[in-house]
Structure formats: structure tokens, C-alpha cells
Image: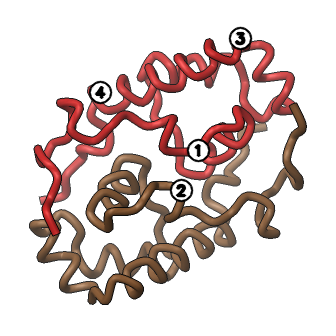
Chain colours: A red, B brown
Amino acid sequence: MTMTEEMTPAYARHVGERLRNIRRQQGLSLQAVEEQSGREFKASVLGAYERGERIISVLRLQRLAHLYGVPVDQLLPRIGDGQSPRGQARSR
Amino acid sequence: MTMTEEMTPAYARHVGERLRNIRRQQGLSLQAVEEQSGREFKASVLGAYERGERIISVLRLQRLAHLYGVPVDQLLPRIGDGQSPRGQARSR
């Protein structure tokens, strides 16, 4: 019963779209992010995240949000945007 | 030059502490979270996250924040709390 839903291409793509949108809003190229991050974020790897080919780790997500100057939530798709496997919000 | 810093025990521990604090603030046991999540978050796995033995994925982090009704940022340690490998904030 181990689920591999963390790796769903759909989710990775949604995250990637957000990452790309924020970067573009900031007028940064992939190369510029690589440089500004002191080569922590290689352009090729960041590009793979943005295309949904790789999923970013929690630590790197936090660092990237910090670099972009936005809250982490802004780099993530909204739950309920059609990609949440469990469907809607749980009322509690 | 592939860095494995995503897996640093220190970061995993910091994340784990936040996860545990929020859960306790909500007065929930590990078992209660397991039930409320429809068994998506097994008590044993959530416990491993909280002890810093495992690092949560971005998708599960987002789901857990949703379940707890808090922003994702609240489940993450503050950058600069002594565990940020790159040190201080980049001014931009």
C-alpha cells in the first residue's frame, strides 16, 4: 500500500509551473538564478524542476522561496486545483 | 559536486520539531492525524518525520499543512535559525 503519489507527474508539473511563473515575474533567467544562488541552483536542475521532470525537496523549496523573497506557499499549487488526489478540503 | 544537504539530519530535525509543535498545538495525537487524514498519514510515518528520521516530501508537506489548516511556511523552520547552510539572507 505504499503510495508513490508524491511523484505524480501532474503534481510535479503544477509545482514546476509555479516555480517558473515566479521566476519570470521577477525577471530572472535560469542563469541569473544560478548566479544569484551562488551556484546552489544550477540552471539545468532548476529547468528540470520547472518542466516537472524533477520534484524539488522541501529544503531547496524553502531556499528558493527565500531567494525569490516570497512565502513557500506561493511556490506551490493550490490544493484543490484539480491535482489533489484526495479531492476537496477536509472540514475540521 | 552533488550535494546531499537536503538530507542533513539537522534540517530534518528542525522540520520535525515544527511538525510536532503544530500537531500538539492542535491537540491532535499521531493516531488522530492518521484517522483524520483517512490513513494517508500513518502514525508511524508521521512520527518518523517528527523525530527527523525521515524528511517529508513537498506534496505531503502541503497536504499536512492543509489538514492542519496552516500555511506551509508555518511547518518549516525559519531560514537563518542556525541551520541554513548558506548562512544569511541574500539581499536583492
Residue B36 placed where, x, y %? 14, 72
Q: Do labels 3 and 1 share a chain?
A: yes
Residue B7 placed where, x, y %? 61, 59
Left or right? Give the position of A37 relative to B75.
right
State how far apart marks 4 and 3 are (Cα): 27 Å
Q: Which of marks 4 and 3 is in front?
A: 3
State how far apart marks 4 and 2 are (Cα): 24 Å
In terms of sequence position, does the residue under pointer 4 or pointer 3 come before the other?
A: 4
Q: Nearer the viewer, mark 4 or mark 1?
A: 1
Q: Do labels 4 and 1 share a chain?
A: yes
The residue indicated by pointer 3 is A27
| Residue closest to the eye, A52 or B65 | B65
The residue indicated by pointer 1 is A71
Three-letter amino acid code at disc 2?
Asp
The residue that appears at 52% across and 38% down in the rendered structure is A56
CB under 8 Å between discs 4 and 2: no
Seen in the picture, residue B76 relative to A5 is either above or below; the reply is below
What SS does tag 2 mark?
helix
Q: Are marks 3 and 2 on the same chain?
A: no
The residue indicated by pointer 4 is A9
Q: Do labels 4 and 2 share a chain?
A: no
The residue indicated by pointer 2 is B73
In terms of sequence position, does the residue under pointer 3 or pointer 1 come before the other?
A: 3
